């Protein structure tokens, strides 16, 4: 299995071999859905809150007497039945964190990369380094490979170059990640994934352990 190997200016140089033990795994849609739910759930802040009847301001006295008014009985104007009253079973601050074994996360990352490889959305780049932190270099690279800036693009390297990271952060849909911080969710949501040969080698050794 192989993919295109590009230079930093976007020209095709040669082919990059991809280890079949990692990049040819068959993705399991239900398993990947579980993983995506796990990552999205852990990103939730859990700060949503609604006030109950006892927390809403006002309503300290009975609005009118119990009997002989011709109206329904009420004890407080902050009852959930009233406008601006309390909320019944509303959201309360809570933790949405889930736990997932490291081995399952590695397998999910392996399947996510394999799915991108099957879609021909995974390309190798010789290096992800810039002499100066200029966004025009990134824009020129994407123009040469005919990739629109609106596309979600993920750059992966063994260790992210500082100049490259500064140049990428000016674009909303572009992101970069070191191999140690890479996860299945970021790979799946990207339209195109660019990896360096060093990142491919490091991922192959790390992800192979997750299947054995």
Image: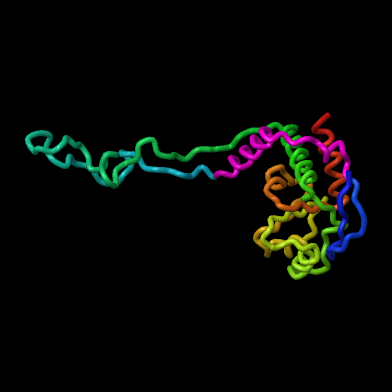
Front-lying residue, 43 or 71: 71
**In-image side of 81 versus 95 (left or right):** left
Where residue 140 appears, x then y in whole percent? Answer: 78, 68
Q: Eyeballing the image, is 191 above or below 49?
A: below
The overriding secondary structure of the stretch rendered in magenta is helix
Q: Residue at x 79, y 65 (%)?
A: 141
Looking at the rendering, in which quadrant would you find the C terminus?
top right
Q: Residue at x 27, y 39 (%)?
A: 81
Q: Residue at x 79, y 47 (%)?
A: 179
| 4 within the magenta span | no
Front-lying residue, 30 or 201: 30
Q: How many marks?
A: 0
Q: What's the coloring here? A: rainbow
| 19 within the magenta span | yes
Where residue 62 appears, x then y in whole percent? Answer: 17, 39
Furthest residue toward top: 212
Task: Determine which quarter of the picture holds residue 79.
Answer: top left
Q: Residue at x 72, y 32 (%)?
A: 104
Furthest residue toward right: 14
Q: Is residue 163 visible?
A: no
Q: Eyeballing the image, is 67 above or below 13?
A: above
Where residue 157 appears, x then y in whole percent? Answer: 81, 52
Range of magenta residues: 18-44
**In-image side of 22 versus 90 (left or right):** right
Q: Eyeballing the image, is 138 above or below 156?
A: below
Where residue 1 appears, x then y in whole percent? Answer: 89, 43
Front-lying residue, 205 or 92: 205
Q: Is residue 35 visible?
A: yes
Q: Eyeballing the image, is 46 above or below 126?
A: above
**In-image side of 88 versus 38 (left or right):** left
């Amino acid at each position: 299995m192989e993919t295109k190997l590009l230079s930093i200016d976007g020209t095709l140089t040669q082919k990059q071999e991809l280890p079949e033990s990692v990049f040819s795994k068959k993705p399991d849609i239900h398993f990947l859905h579980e993983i995506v739910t796990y990552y999205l759930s852990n990103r939730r802040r859990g700060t949503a809150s609604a006030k109950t009847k006892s927390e809403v301001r006002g309503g300290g006295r009975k609005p009118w007497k119990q009997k002989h008014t011709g109206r329904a009985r009420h004890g407080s104007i902050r009852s959930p039945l009233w406008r601006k009253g309390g909320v019944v079973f509303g959201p309360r601050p809570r933790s949405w964190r889930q736990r997932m074994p490291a081995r399952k996360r590695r397998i999910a990352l392996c399947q996510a990369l394999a799915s991108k490889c099957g879609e021909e959305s995974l390309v190798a780049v010789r290096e992800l380094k810039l002499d100066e932190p200029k966004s025009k270099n990134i824009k020129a690279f994407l123009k040469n490979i005919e990739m629109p800036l609106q596309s979600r693009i993920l750059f992966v390297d063994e260790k992210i170059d500082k100049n490259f990271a500064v140049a990428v952060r000016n674009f909303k849909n572009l992101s970069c990640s070191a191999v140690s911080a890479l996860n299945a969710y970021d790979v799946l949501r990207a339209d195109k994934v660019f990896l360096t040969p060093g990142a491919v080698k490091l991922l192959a050794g790390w992800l192979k352990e997750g299947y054995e």
